[in-house]
Image: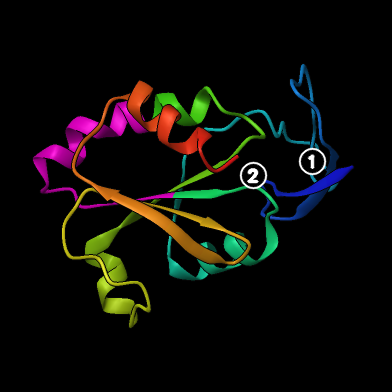
Amino acid sequence: MHINVVCPHCLKVSSVKKKETYTAEHCKECGGSLLESKPLNANLAILDYFIHTSDLPVIVDFWAPWCGPCLTMAPHFEAAAMAMPLQAQFLKINNDNAQTQNPTIIIVNIPAVLVFKNGKEIDRFTGARSSKQIIKWVEKYL
């Protein structure tokens, strides 16, 4: 079985054989490592592309640079992303910018972390969480 994964380097789609663990996996287009799972800074257009193209759950942190809990959670969100290569794809969206892009996603409180699967939002949480809590939450949707 193969899964479609969006390359975080070139944003092209690569078909990857689904495995329990990976030692190496590279983008078919640019050659970049698909195991580099650091969260990608994105906008709503990129989010839309990921949720409609990737077969993996897409985990999105809506945050703002003035938000203390957002800044506290940022390293935990990154650690969770780095611990889950080719299990989920992690994005970060500055909510201040997103709200000016005529959003279809309503964010009331931040940080807000949403999970998208099969093209639609299936769950979310608000408030800062640790990397272990984020990983445990994401694992429910793998």
Q: Is residue 76 magenta?
A: yes
Residue at numbered disc 2: 9
Q: Is residue 111 magenta?
A: no
* 96 on left or right of 49: left
Which element type, helix, strand or loop, lies under badge 2? loop
Quarter of the figure that contains the N terminus:
top right
Please report the bounds of the magenta region as a residue range: 60-77
* 137 on left or right of 23: left
Numbered tag placed on residue 105 in the rendering: none
The residue type indicated by label 1 comes to: Cys
Measuring from the top left, give residue 54's x and y in whole percent. 68, 55
Task: Residue at 69%, 62% (x, y): give it.
Answer: 53
Which corner quadrant of the image does residue 13 belong to? Answer: bottom right
Residue at numbered disc 1: 27
Q: Residue furthest front?
A: 140
Number of marks present in the image shown: 2
* 9 on left or right of 93: right
Which element type, helix, strand or loop, lies under badge 1? loop
Query: Label 2 near label 1: C-beta < 8 Å?
Result: yes
For disc 1, the neighbor class at 10 Å (few under 14, some 14 to 19, many from 20) is many
How far is the residue under mark 1 from the one under mark 2?
Answer: 9 Å
Measuring from the top left, give residue 111's x and y in whole percent. 22, 48
Quarter of the figure that contains the C terminus:
top right
The residue type indicated by label 2 comes to: His
Q: As rendered, which of 32 and 72 lies closer to the eye?
A: 72
Task: Residue at 17%, 65% (x, y): give it.
Answer: 108
* 12 on left or right of 103: right
- Relative to 50, residue 41 above or below: above
For disc 2, the neighbor class at 10 Å (few under 14, some 14 to 19, many from 20) is some
- Relative to 95, residue 21 above or below: above
